[in-house]
Amino acid sequence: MPIKLPSFRPRRDVYPPDLWTKCPSCGDMLFNKQLEKADRICPTCDHHFRLSAAARLELLLDPGTFRERDAGLQSVDPLGFVDQKAYPDRVATAQSQTGLRDAAVRGVGAIEGQAVSICVMDFGFMGGSMGAVVGEKVTRAGEDALAERIPLIVVSASGGARMQEGTLALMQLAKTCAILERVRAARVPYISVMSDPTTGGVFASYAVLGDINLAEPNALIGFAGARVSAGTISQELPPGFQRSEFLFEHGFVDRIVNRRALRAEIAGLLRFMRPREVPVDTRSAFSPIGSFLSQVVGAASGGMVGASGSSATNGERDG
Amino acid sequence: MVDRLLGRQDPKDGNKAAAATDPKSAMWRRVQLARNLGRPRTLDLLREMADEVIELHGDRGFGDDPAMAVGFARIEGRRIAFVGQQKGADTEENIRRNFGMPHPEGYRKAMRIFELAERFALPIVTFVDVPGAHPGPESEERGIADAIARSIGLMSRLRTPIIAIITGEGGSGGALAIAVGDVVIALENAVYSVISPEGCAAILWRTAEEAPTAALAMKMSAQDQLELGVVDRVVPEPGEGAHADPRETARRLRSVIIGELDRLGALTTDELVEARYRRYRMLGPYTEVSAPDVAPPPSRGLADRLRDLLDPTRWSMGMPLPGSSRRDEPPAHEEV
Ligand SMILES: [Zn+2]
């Protein structure tokens, strides 16, 4: 339920920063408490502010259904990376500021009664950057989706790979893209939700690879940063460059969805995309993913056949 | 940046750095060597090592990317499919080839050849030498992130052997997109990183001047990458480096490729694909702690206020949004 918030012309000194936030789109000063209540959407211009992982899960999942998994995964410092601050200190600071262990939270839950494996990112933790922990959580979310034959949902909010983990962060692109190939081969649906921002290596791996790609309005979504572009290419950037609408226009986003409509939207999509039982036939003999399919068939016939079989045939029962 | 793209450097600088003993100068010298304009490129190496090279062109959707070379080759009688970025040998060729920075159609051309290779049971050899995928607006419009992610995914499951060789610059996702392999080899002076040292320095040190410091911190040398397990084998370069003796460099690579083709050829396809999957599944260390929570923020109200304080949008009055970010973190607006 949108709430009309009080809005004034800004005069910075009058607004203590812990109470007020200025909307970057329309310039209105918004009272923080009410902004939180309004799902962090500006009541004047619909600007979507960034959301914490906890708020995101609350918004998407049926109340009380979330069960967190792998809450204990924590980053290590494989390079001994020190810039102006040591990497472990950055992690510790981010942890005490956010109450999170790293930039992603994953588990299982339900969306309008449909069980899902879900992983959501939090930009507040080191810019949502992806190191080994984030890569591992996304991968395990994929593995659970595969094993339990439930849809996979990933909500991205990230500046990209975590520099402090070097190429080991880069390798998370390979790890996550590889599990998504298996999820796809097993006919388990994957919906990617991109929020502001979804850039760099996160965009160029699991975020872009959804069977369905959804984006929040006006989110920054792109591969190369403006600084990279500006440094390399002297060229004017088109208006709205790397925004959700730009991606939509160029065919890389299926739908741009207001935050408040996301849960219903995902539920609606999932009713068309039930995880299917892989038919036990000779397909594996000539399929490029043959050996893997036969594994999946093995897993599927071990108990999940009934559930997935009935959903494949009774597609419209819950219209 | 232009100097960097052109691989310009003062040769005397390189020698001085070589003489210096401090690790930062030594690392920076390697970065310079990896970018050396005279370094042999994909097609140069193939011309030296192959009996036959047939280059193929086009992604069948948009065009032919001159920054990416693909095709068939025969090396000591063995038929392979090859894919590699192709930088130019001089400024003119570099401009024509976009400095070896592929657009999406380059990666889609690569995927075409990967699939062909799988169908005709040809092992794949890739040559990785790229500052990064092309960062321009056309690249974004045509879906560079999509092309990279799909190429990575495809390589992770291809049912044919893949040998990936980092020959020069292994620049981020634009490199990994053709570098997912059963074995990853690097030339001695090649570098591999998640972001360019200049980009890393600009973000974490607030100045590109600190690029050598960033290069050292990211451990981007071939030897470092070997120790991290990202690279499996390092091939020594002759004399001053690959640029000094391209023929000898190609000869050394040829014998390594032949050896790996034999080794990988002895595996069943199922073993091959499963081992490749596991290779990447296990990369990236983390720890698992049993304690349920990190010290939680004092109260929800304060946490929210902290979050709001830190929200970069708060600092953006009068500044372009949202390239800026909280001081502490990598900004959203950067290729990483
Ligand atoms: Zn507004």
Image (cartoon, rainbow, N blue to C red):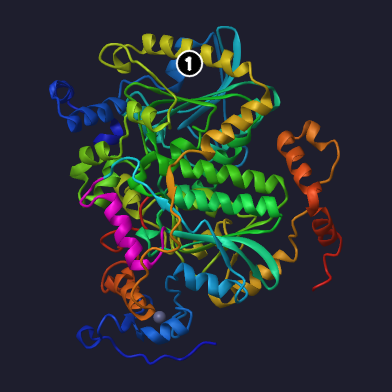
Give the position of the C terminus of chain A as an image quadrant: bottom right
Q: From the viewer's side, name the closer residue of A89 and B323.
A: A89
For image coordinates 32% across by 80% down, the residue present is A22
For image coordinates 33% across by 70% down, the residue present is B311
Identify the chain of the residue marked 1, using the numbered disc in the image. B
* Residue B305 image position (x, y, % from top left): 32, 78
Instruction: Report ligand 1 position as a quadrant.
Output: bottom left
Q: Which residues are magenta?
A: A82-102
For image coordinates 19% across by 33% down, the residue present is B24
Look at the image and say whether residue A95 sits in the magenta stretch. Answer: yes
Q: Quadrant of residue A318?
A: bottom right
One can see residue A155 in this view: no
Q: Quadrant of residue B40?
A: top left
Image height of A58 relative to B66, above or below: below
State the SS at label 1: helix
* Residue B264 image position (x, y, % from top left): 59, 19
Image height of B321 relative to B16, above or below: below
Give the position of the N terminus of chain A as an image quadrant: bottom right
* Residue B110 image position (x, y, % from top left): 56, 33
| Left or right, residue B138 beside residue A31 | right
* Residue B42 image position (x, y, % from top left): 45, 22
Q: From the viewer's side, name the closer residue of B326 and B110.
A: B326
For image coordinates 61% across by 51% down, the residue present is A142
